[in-house]
Image (cartoon, coloured by chain):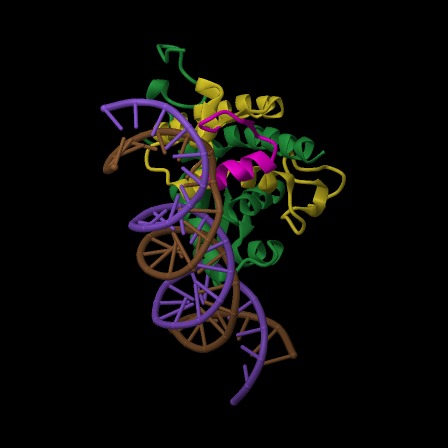
Chain colours: A green, B yellow, C brown, D purple
DNA sequence: TAAATTACGCAGAAATATATGACCGAATGC
DNA sequence: GCATTCGGTCATATATTTCTGCGTAATTTA
């Protein structure tokens, strides 16, 4: 079987197994880690949420992890941080429009996960 | 906003943010880790492959990681290990039928990853 | 006869991810 | 006056993941 122009559905051309970073691995890095999915899920379910509210909702998360995960999600364009300079300070996190295209994919992965467990 | 019967597309009912393990996180555990995607990708592209051939194709992988990743994928039902008692020993790895439903989802995640990068 | 191939296993080290608990300054409620 | 809330930061500790290098037994190749 020659790896010609016929490219894999998820790896770039015949470069796979991935010598260079394949887009799938990149995508998995964005949503990987212990707390990213719970964060995305919570924001999707409840809309804009303040930091401490998020912390209360996501059981077990620490300040360190919540703050760093939010930062990564923000720099990856999944989460939008909005700061209102009231007193006390109000900061709200929500999903970006860009991330909307990700949700149905996660839904399918979730369904697969359910079925795969039997 | 009350979290009633209206359930999230990828988390189980109103249990999310995930107190119990959500199926999406479970799914991500199956394909997570540094080498799982390259392995799945290689097996998908090239079909049944022997251990050392796989090792040559997946650049940078060590015996420890390749062996342990293959074992996990096998116990998760993604990869099938077939041993032929010839001399020298021949062992072939390939994707299971069960895993076929996963491929198009990974494809979409990959597409998302590509677009997300711009 | 020596070297390479086969499919890995193992111990220990290094790198990365995650957790713990204290702390910040301004404001508010008791 | 004291504790709490706001949204985090920081240093350190632990846990998990991944890497390094070596070893195996049978067999084929040079």
Q: Residue at x 56, y 54 (%)?
A: A54
Relative horizontal placement of residue A90, taking residue A109 as reference (left or right): left
* Magenta part of the chain: B67-89
Relative horizontal placement of residue A72, taking residue B6 as reference (left or right): left
Q: Quadrant of the C terminus of chain A?
A: top right
In the depicted view, which residue is nearer to us: A34 or B94? B94
Relative horizontal placement of residue A92, taking residue B15 as reference (left or right): left
Q: Residue at x 66, y 52 (%)?
A: B19
Q: Residue at x 44, y 28 (%)?
A: B88
Q: Is residue B98 visible?
A: yes
Query: Quick one: which residue is furthest to the right in this view?
Result: B5
Determine which quarter of the picture holds residue A2.
Answer: top left
Determine which quarter of the picture holds residue B72.
Answer: top right
- Tell me if residue A104 is in the magenta stretch: no
Residue C10 image position (x, y, % from top left): 46, 53
Residue A45 in the image: above or below residue C23 = above
Residue B10 image position (x, y, % from top left): 63, 36
Residue B113 image position (x, y, % from top left): 42, 29
Q: Is residue B34 visible?
A: no
Relative horizontal placement of residue B117, taking residue A99 as reference (left or right): left
Residue A14 image position (x, y, % from top left): 35, 18
Picture mark count = 0
Q: Residue at x 40, y 15 (%)?
A: A7
In the depicted view, which residue is nearer to us: D19 or A113? D19
Q: Quadrant of the N terminus of chain A?
A: top left
Residue A66 in the image: above or below residue B84 = below
Residue B3 in the image: above or below residue A19 = below
């Amino acid at each position: 079987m020659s790896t010609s122009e016929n490219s894999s559905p998820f790896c770039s051309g015949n470069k796979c197994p991935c010598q260079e970073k394949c887009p799938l691995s990149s995508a998995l890095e964005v949503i990987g880690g212990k707390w990213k999915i719970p964060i995305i899920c919570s924001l999707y379910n409840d809309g804009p949420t303040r930091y401490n509210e998020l912390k209360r909702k996501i059981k077990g998360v620490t300040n360190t992890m919540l703050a760093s995960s939010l930062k990564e999600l923000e720099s990856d364009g999944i989460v939008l941080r909005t700061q209102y300079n009231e007193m006390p300070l109000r900061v709200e996190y929500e999903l970006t429009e860009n991330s909307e295209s990700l949700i149905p994919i996660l839904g399918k992965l979730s369904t697969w996960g359910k079925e795969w467990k039997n």
